[in-house]
Amino acid sequence: MTESPRPKNNPQNRTTRTNPPLSPVMLIFITALDTTWRAFVPTLGGVFLGIGLDHLLGIAPVGTIICLIGGTALSILLIVKQLRDVRKPLN
């Protein structure tokens, strides 16, 4: 019988592949997309949740206003967290 072309399992000599570093342009693009969802998803989610609550409970426009403020506050907190994570030193 012939041997398999795959390397044998050898835990002592294992090699790990590392991903190539991202280009600066790609890093900026990914950061911009990450910031964009953090800004818009909670705010729009709050608006739609508020509209649903207004319709369900008949309290228009109170639910929309409250959920809009809550969504905006959540967006601000998510962006602040992102900025803190970006500024952390890599150790």
Image: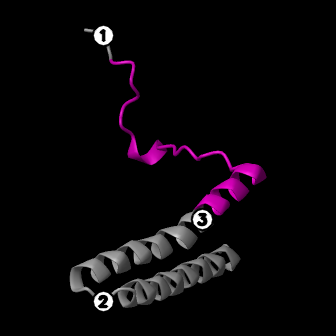
Q: Secondary structure at mark 2?
A: loop
Q: Amino acid at mark 3?
A: Thr
Residue that appears at 46% across and 74% down: 42
* Disc 2 and disc 3 in contact, CB within 8 angstroms: no
Expressed as whole percent of the image width and height from the top left, the position of residue 22 reads: 69, 50
Res 36 label: 3
**Displayed quadrant of residue 50:** bottom left
Expressed as whole percent of the image width and height from the top left, the position of residue 31 reads: 65, 62
Res 59 label: 2
Q: Secondary structure at mark 3?
A: helix
**Displayed quadrant of residue 38:** bottom right
Res 77 label: none
Marks 1 and 3, Cα distance to the nearest angstrom?
55 Å
Marks 2 and 3, Cα distance to the nearest angstrom?
31 Å
Span highlighted in magenta in the image: 4-33
| Left or right: 76, with 41 as reference point | right
> Crowdedness of circle 2 by 10 Å Cα count: few (<14), some, many (20+)?
few
> Crowdedness of circle 1 by 10 Å Cα count: few (<14), some, many (20+)?
few
Residue 7 counted in the magenta span = yes
Q: How is the image coloured?
A: one colour
Quadrant showing the N terminus:
top left
Expressed as whole percent of the image width and height from the top left, the position of residue 28 reads: 72, 58
> Crowdedness of circle 3 by 10 Å Cα count: few (<14), some, many (20+)?
few
Quadrant showing the C terminus:
bottom right
Q: Earlier in the sequence, mark 2 or mark 1?
A: 1
Residue that appears at 39% across and 86% down: 61
Q: Amino acid at mark 1?
A: Thr
From what the image shows, is residue 35 above or below residue 18?
Answer: below
Q: Quick check: can you spot residue 89?
A: no
